[in-house]
Image (spheres, helix red, strand yellow):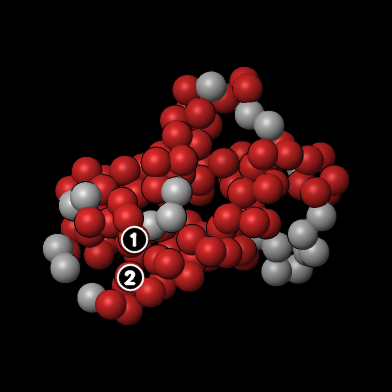
Amino acid sequence: MDERILKWLFDVKMAIDEIDSYFIDEEKDFFKYRSNLMLKRAVERDLEIIGEAINRIITRDKYFEIKITNAKAIISLRNQVIHAYDNISDENIWSILTNHLPKLKKEIEYLIDEK
């Protein structure tokens, strides 16, 4: 595997682990999340990193577009967070955190182990 792709896979893994770390001492509670601006901004920043890294990965090697479920949607989310920041839905971000991030984490760990 290309060393740059491996580095970007690790960037995704680290961003997901960072998001998980925000909830170590706190249960995942949407209403607490919604009322904590600092937490929301931290999560959004990590989602930007994830989207940018995945964009770089699939730009470098199209093979990964089929290996990473919803790669294009992840990149679209990154673009929305950066460019349409005033139109971010807390509910949408929360759904990503609870429903999609665990699956992405497994896929990324598998790809890293596959190297």
Q: How many marks?
A: 2
- At 73% from the left and 39% from the top, the residue drawn is 91
Q: Is residue 21 left or right of residue 11?
A: right
User: Looking at the image, do the residues carrying marks 1 and 2 touch, with CB atoms under 8 Å apart?
Assistant: yes
Q: Residue furthest left?
A: 2
Above-or-below relation of 115 to 27: below
Q: Quadrant of the C terminus?
A: bottom left
| Separation of marks 1 and 2 at Cα, in angstroms | 8 Å
Helix, strand or loop for disc 1: helix
Q: Which mark is residue 115?
A: none
Residue 88: image quadrant is: top right
* Residue under pointer 2: 111
- Label 1 amino acid? Lys
- At mark 2, the secondary structure is helix
Q: Position of residue 93 (x, y in %)?
A: 64, 42
Which circle, 1 or 2, is nearer the viewer? Answer: 1
Residue at 81% in and 40% down:
35
Please, is residue 27 above or below residue 37 in the view? below
Q: Residue at x 39, y 48 (%)?
A: 71
- Towards the viewer: 115 or 10: 115
Label 2 amino acid? Leu
Q: Residue furthest bottom?
A: 113
103 above or below 84?
below
Q: What's the mark number on residue 67?
A: 1
Mark 2 burial class by Cα count in 10 Å: few <14, some 14-19, many 20+: some
Q: Nearer the viewer, residue 69 or 6?
A: 69
Residue 78 visible in this rendered orientation of the protein: no
